[in-house]
Image: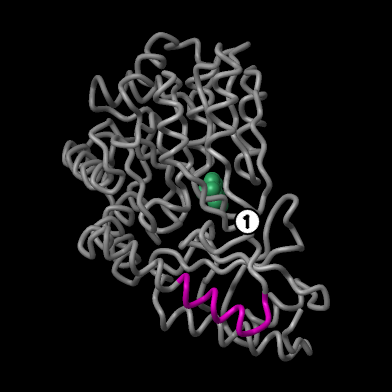
């Protein structure tokens, strides 16, 4: 089965092989700490940052929760910019940790307007932290991170940005754009298995974490634990997932050997290929225009006459390709192909599109919806 979903993706054989090597005790073996540091170095190159970067055991959401838990205290107003499922999730995390979300809401099918973020920041002068999602994977919309980061930086507001499904597939310049907490995941454009949250944390953000220390109401989701164990003593706050980190290290090698500009170009090309093939089948893209369609995930409207569950089952069982529906408000309305990471290759895209065409034909869909 080819996993053509927007994370996890198919995992390259060399990454799978690396995962199968014997493990060590990462808490006791000094060689592991050295290895972890070298993986951090690769992650810095990917994220374009000189900040401390963390590899946490838990999926992408752990990074989002840890950022909010660590930087938002009870009663803090937080600018939560949202035009999708994960932006809405940030609103929930802020409430969960006692913060007061000041919500800037945009339509799900178009990018956030940076002007609306600047205006909201000017109107709410007591905001110190903002949250933002670069690629809203459930809708396939790519948001203007660079512009929103500039608006935050200009006003001294700390920015938490989710780049989980864009990192590695389209430019993310953590330091030069001014992203304070930049959050990635292992299973999207890096095509490593799921299980790791990646975070770069700026000095300004560490200062907040140090001020709050033990008062952060979390353990796994507290950056203070990383500050007091890893940053200060080169010890881990909990036993790291050795095999997952080995896989991540190999996946980072794959991306860095190719080079980021080439990876971005490949994602763009394959995304255009899939979009035009979808149109050829009579499917309509979900995002309002192609300019805001993320090069890492393709989201199309489900034709009314095609039952989603049947389509997905046919694709898997008859044609050996797994694609995805969507989540939240988009559940049942949107079909998604994960043309990210290892999957962003023309032959894989064509295999996915052939399977989609056949399954649609089997269900009597002839296009033109
Ligand atoms: C934009 C975005 N943020 C966060 C997450 C959460 O990542 P995970 O599923 O690894 O917890 C996802 C997963 O799909 C995502 O697409």
The residue where tag 1 is placed is 139
| Residue 69, horizontal then vertical, whole percent | 53, 23
Left or right side of 44 for 284? right
Is residue 282 one of those drawn in magenta? yes
Q: Which residue occupies the foreground of this view, 292 or 43?
A: 292
| Residue 143, horizontal then vertical, whole percent | 52, 47
Q: How many marks?
A: 1
| Residue 245, horizontal then vertical, whole percent | 33, 49
Magenta stretch?
271-283
In which quadrant of the rendered view does residue 170 lie?
bottom left
Visual colour scheme? one colour
Q: Which residue occupies the foreground of this view, 306 or 9?
A: 306
Secondary-structure class at tag 1 = loop
| Residue plotted at (76% across, 77% down) | 310
Is residue 331 one of those drawn in magenta? no
| Residue 81, horizontal then vertical, whole percent | 59, 34
Left or right side of 99 for 146? left
Neighbourhood count class around disc 1 (C-alpha, 10 Å): few under 14, some 14–19, many 20 upward: many
| Residue plotted at (64% across, 84% down) | 281
| Residue plotted at (62% across, 38% down) | 82
Q: Height in image: 307 above or below 152? A: below
Q: Which residue occupies the foreground of this view, 104 or 132?
A: 104
Left or right side of 308 for 349? left
Q: Main secondary structure of the magenta part?
A: helix
């Amino acid at each position: 089965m080819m996993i053509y979903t927007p994370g996890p993706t198919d995992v390259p054989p060399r990454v799978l092989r690396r995962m199968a090597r014997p493990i060590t005790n990462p808490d006791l073996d000094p060689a592991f700490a050295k290895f972890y540091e070298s993986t951090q170095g690769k992650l810095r190159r990917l994220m374009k940052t000189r900040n401390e970067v963390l590899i946490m055991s838990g999926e992408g959401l752990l990074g989002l929760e840890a950022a909010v838990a660590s930087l938002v205290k009870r009663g803090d107003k937080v600018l939560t910019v949202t035009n999708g499922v994960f932006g809405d999730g940030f609103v929930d995390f802020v409430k969960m940790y006692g913060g007061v979300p000041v919500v800037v809401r945009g339509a799900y099918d178009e990018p956030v307007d940076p002007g609306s973020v600047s205006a909201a920041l000017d109107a709410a002068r007591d905001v110190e932290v903002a949250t933002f999602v670069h690629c809203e994977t459930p809708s396939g919309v790519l948001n203007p991170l660079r512009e929103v980061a500039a608006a935050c930086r200009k006003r001294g507001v700390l920015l938490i940005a989710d780049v989980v499904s864009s990192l590695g597939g389209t430019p993310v310049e953590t330091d030069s754009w001014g992203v304070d907490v930049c959050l990635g995941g292992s299973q999207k454009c890096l095509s490593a298995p799921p299980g790791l949250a990646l975070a770069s944390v700026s000095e300004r953000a560490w200062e907040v974490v140090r001020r709050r220390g033990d008062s952060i109401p979390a353990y796994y989701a507290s950056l203070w634990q990383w500050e007091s164990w890893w940053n200060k003593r080169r010890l881990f706050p909990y036993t790291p997932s050795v095999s997952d980190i080995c896989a991540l290290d190999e996946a980072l090698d794959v991306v860095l050997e190719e080079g980021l500009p080439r990876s971005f170009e490949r994602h763009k090309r394959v995304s255009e290929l899939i979009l035009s093939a979808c149109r050829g089948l009579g499917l309509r893209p979900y995002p309002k225009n192609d300019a805001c369609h993320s090069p890492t995930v393709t989201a199309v409207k489900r034709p009314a006459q095609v039952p989603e569950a049947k389509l997905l089952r046919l694709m898997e069982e008859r044609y050996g390709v797994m694609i995805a529906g969507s989540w939240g408000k988009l559940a049942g309305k949107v079909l998604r192909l994960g043309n990210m990471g290892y999957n962003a290759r023309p032959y894989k895209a064509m295999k996915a599109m052939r399977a989609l065409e056949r399954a649609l034909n089997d269900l009597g869909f002839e296009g033109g919806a």
